[in-house]
């Protein structure tokens, strides 16, 4: 069944329920004894940011709406992986206020006929924005269902005209220690880098993303522009992108560099290939499944197998993990 709705209505309706849900999740986490006292502060910070957030509305594209229940706004914006703002999931919502998402430039270069530096407004004008409800699954075994706003990355790729040598696309996140306190810690080799094969980057599911839930991206979700690749583990979706480069070699990616035996270049959601330290066969839906609920089964390519399966035809997905 397709879900048709207006983002404006959603964002105004959601707050009371979201506050309730977040509190419930918090109580569940307290019960499980897995939360630090400092996390209480995230509730207020998240509410303040949402009250002042800039609206960004777009028509829902009926072709890209999963039927799962949308994760509450509060969970999407207060349970984040963004290591530039701390390695705990409650940290980015508290510390990402120092990120300045405007003015912002994205350099598009490498093996293209028309390299160009786009400012945010010229990037936003490249194609009509649409809202898409996608699943996001983290390699850590949790997932969310997020109403993203953006347009296919293919629209940008078309503009810059990759040469016939271009085979891969590299994404680079901002690395400014003045804006990003997490850069002081050497958890990753900054800047955060990710990459896709050119055909993956051109796939209609790959979304250049500017907003969620009818608002511009909150800083902790990767403002002002990120990538969303719904059939791959969340870490492939680089946040706060400042550079997109076309190359003929497979790019070095931050997670592959830090732990090559754990994180391969492909990183497709695949319940049949375990992470070396844990199973990938199931997941917990944030905001919905408590610590005591049975975990739900993880789907091949995160449920997008009919759309993306042929990209990997003939590849051994245990080898190309
Ligand atoms: N620059 C940057 N991008 C990043 C990360 C990060 O730490 N830094 N974390 C990744 C991981 S592991 C996940 S699961 C998703 C989380 O996106 P969300 O916080 O919007 O849900 O962002 C990805 N993009
Ligand atoms: Mo992740």
Image (tube, helix red, strand yellow):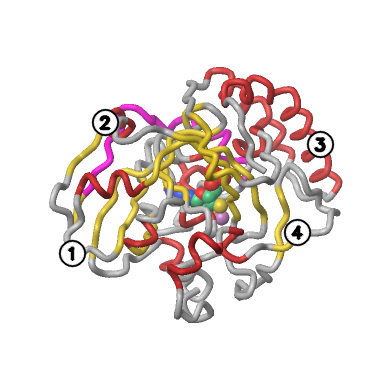
Which of the two discs, 1 and 4, labels the residue nearer the N terminus? 1
Determine whether the residue tagged by mark 2 lies in a helix, strand or loop. Answer: helix
The image quadrant where one finds the N terminus is: top right
Q: Secondary structure at mark 3?
A: helix
Label drawn at residue 296: 4
Does residue 306 appear left or right of residue 248 in this picture? right
Q: Which residue in the structure is indicated by mark 3?
A: 24
Q: Quadrant of residue 124?
A: top left
**Could you tell which of marks 3 and 2 lies nearer the N-terminus?**
3
| Magenta residue span | 89-108
**Residue 269 visible in the snapshot:** yes
What residue sits 25% from the left and 54% below the top? 245
> Label 2 near label 4: C-beta < 8 Å?
no
Q: Nearer the viewer, residue 271 or 50?
A: 271
Q: Earlier in the sequence, mark 4 or mark 2?
A: 2
Q: Nearer the viewer, mark 1 or mark 4?
A: 1
Q: Which residue is mark 2?
A: 122
Q: CA distance from mark 4 to mark 3?
A: 20 Å
Picture residue at 53% right of the left edge, 80% below the top: 318
Q: Earlier in the sequence, mark 4 or mark 3?
A: 3
Q: Which mark is residue 164?
A: 1
Q: Residues within 10 Å of mark 2 (few under 14, many from 20)?
A: few
Circle 3 crowding by C-alpha within 10 Å: few under 14, some 14–19, many from 20: some
In space, the residues marked 3 and 2 are separated at their CA atoms by: 42 Å
Residue 97 is a magenta residue: yes
Q: Which SS class for mark 4?
A: strand
């Amino acid at each position: 069944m397709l879900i048709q709705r207006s983002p404006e209505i959603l964002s105004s309706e959601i707050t009371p329920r979201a506050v309730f849900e977040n509190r419930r999740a918090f109580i569940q986490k307290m019960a499980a004894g897995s939360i630090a006292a400092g996390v209480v502060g995230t509730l207020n910070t998240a509410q303040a940011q949402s009250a002042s957030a800039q609206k960004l509305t777009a028509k829902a594209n009926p072709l890209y709406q999963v039927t799962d229940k949308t994760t509450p706004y509060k969970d999407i914006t207060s349970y984040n992986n963004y290591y530039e703002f701390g390695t705990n999931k409650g940290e980015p919502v508290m510390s990402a206020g120092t990120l300045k998402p405007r003015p912002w430039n994205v350099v598009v270069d490498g093996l293209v006929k028309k390299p160009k530096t786009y400012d945010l407004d010229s990037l936003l004008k490249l194609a009509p924005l649409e809202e898409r409800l996608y699943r996001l699954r983290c390699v850590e075994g949790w997932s969310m269902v997020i109403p993203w706003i953006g347009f296919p990355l293919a629209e940008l790729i078309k503009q810059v005209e990759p040469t016939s040598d271009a085979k891969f696309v590299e994404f680079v996140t901002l690395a400014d220690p003045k804006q990003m306190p997490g850069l002081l810690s050497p958890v990753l080799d900054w800047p955060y880098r990710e990459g896709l094969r050119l055909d993956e980057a051109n796939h209609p599911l790959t979304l250049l993303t500017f907003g969620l839930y009818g608002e511009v991206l909150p800083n902790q979700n990767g403002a002002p522009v990120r990538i969303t690749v719904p059939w791959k583990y969340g870490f492939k979706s680089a946040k706060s992108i400042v550079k997109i480069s076309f190359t003929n070699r497979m790019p070095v990616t931050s997670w592959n560099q830090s732990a090559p035996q754990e994180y391969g270049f492909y990183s497709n959601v695949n319940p049949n290939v375990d992470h070396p330290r844990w199973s990938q066969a199931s997941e917990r839906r944030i905001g919905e499944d408590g610590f005591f609920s049975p975990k739900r089964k993880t789907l091949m390519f995160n449920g997008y197998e009919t759309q993306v399966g042929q990209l990997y035809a003939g590849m051994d997905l245990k080898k190309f993990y």
